[in-house]
Amino acid sequence: MRIENRTIRIVIRAALALVLLSLLALLLIYLLEPEWSPFLEEEEDVEETLIPGEEGFVHHQRSAYLTHLAMDDIGVAPLPAPYSLGWRTGIGIPDLDPMWFKWPAPRPGWYLNWSTNRVEQRRFFGLWRTVHMALPDEDLGMEFVPMVRIRRNRLLPRATDLRRMAAQNPGRTWLIGNEPDVRWQDNVRPERYAELYYDAYTAIKRGDPTAQVAIGGLSQITPLRLVYLDRVWAAYQAEYGEPMPVDVWNMHAFVLREERGNWGVGMPPGFTTEQLGMLWDIDDHADLRLVEEQIRRLRQWMAEHDQQAKPLWITEYGILMPESYGFPPAVVQDFMLGSFALFDSLRDPQLGYAADENRLVQRWVWFSTLYNPYPAGNLFNISGRPKVLMRAWSEYLAERE
């Protein structure tokens, strides 16, 4: 009898140990889960070919001459009031942190950096993991808008982190993806994008029901890119039985060629047959009429899909072509300031956002502060000091606010 009882105790202890080990293994899998899985479709190794005649893409590196500044070095500025011109104008920061640059006042009212600014901390030998969003100093007067990225058909950050960061940062607007239609950007088929959008939207809203979620900006709004959007919209409806919930509509407004094997943005992923895109040329790149056409094209699509009563943001546009192709600083400045005037003035009672005096565009982001591959639109020099273009922006705001 004693032997039987002892055997039972040993079996029970072994079973408990096995259960504990299993729970520990599951915990480690959860904590150490990679951001993507090798079992999903691999990313294509695609070279960026936005500019014609390039002999290999030059990757961006942070300038060695940049110095991380304190608020005393930059100067305090208030956050601009909603729907003011300062609130509308934003900037993209490839170097991630606005404190690398000496901003004049007034300055852009918001920025993005193609990430969520996720900071991860691990404690207790990696068994406990926390995440949070790094935010700028409030005295900078620039709102940060996080962007969720897609890498190898997975969300980055993953959905559990999005839920946590959304709960920590209520009321924020989240952008889901960056140019999913471009093979060297987020590079995802429209049907898969619909699934990932659902995952991101659900996670963010669970963390913060007051959050606003924006669809990822397509590189440009052309008939070809609207086919991509149509497929996203149809896939979401088919999979989840309801229209895709989009709080903020979003687009990019570049003027680039759509042709397989040529410069420009090429064909979207998932488009296996040759389809005719817009065969824009270099001289079209700074044509604001073509930018306006894109805005009206998306607003028309929104109206046809019962989305007119939603804001529209342009979260990336600018001049990518170099000065040697006919885009000297004067041309870039005229384009930038002309775009500000265009976006602020475009109104249409049939297509516009009624809550903003029927404007077609609510907010926009210039590309960029400082970026090696496409320097024509740089606002700052390699030391982080404002160039003529940044000063012109600041003067434009000062004269109108």
Image (tube, rainbow, N blue to C red):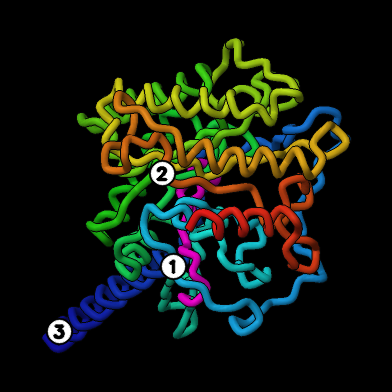
Observer-side mark, 2 or 3, equals 2
> Does 312 sit left or right of 19 as displayed?
right
- Quadrant in the picture for residue 324: top right
Q: Residue 79 shows which numbered tag?
A: 1
Q: Which residue is mark 2?
A: 362
Q: Dot 2: few (<14), some (14–19), or many (≥20) neighbours within 10 Å? A: many
Q: Which residue is mark 3?
A: 5
Crowding at mark 1 (Cα within 10 Å: few <14, some 14-19, many 20+): some
Secondary element under disc 1, as helix, strand or loop, is loop
State whether residue 245 appears in this view: yes
Amino acid at pointer 1: Leu
Q: State the image coordinates of residue 281 (x, y, percent, origin top left).
A: 73, 20
Mark closer to the chain start, 3 or 1 = 3
Point out residue 123 in the picture as x, y percentages from the top left corner. Answer: 46, 83
Q: Could you tell me the amino acid type at mark 2? A: Gln
Dot 3 amino acid type: Asn
* The image quarter in which residue 94 lies: bottom right
x 50%, y 17%: residue: 223
Q: Answer above or below: position of 342 versus 59.
A: above
User: Could you tell whether 358 is left or right of 28 in the image?
Assistant: left
Which portion, as a residue range, is magenta? Answer: 138-156
Q: Secondary structure at mark 2?
A: loop
- Give whichever of discs 2 and 1 has the lower sequence position: 1
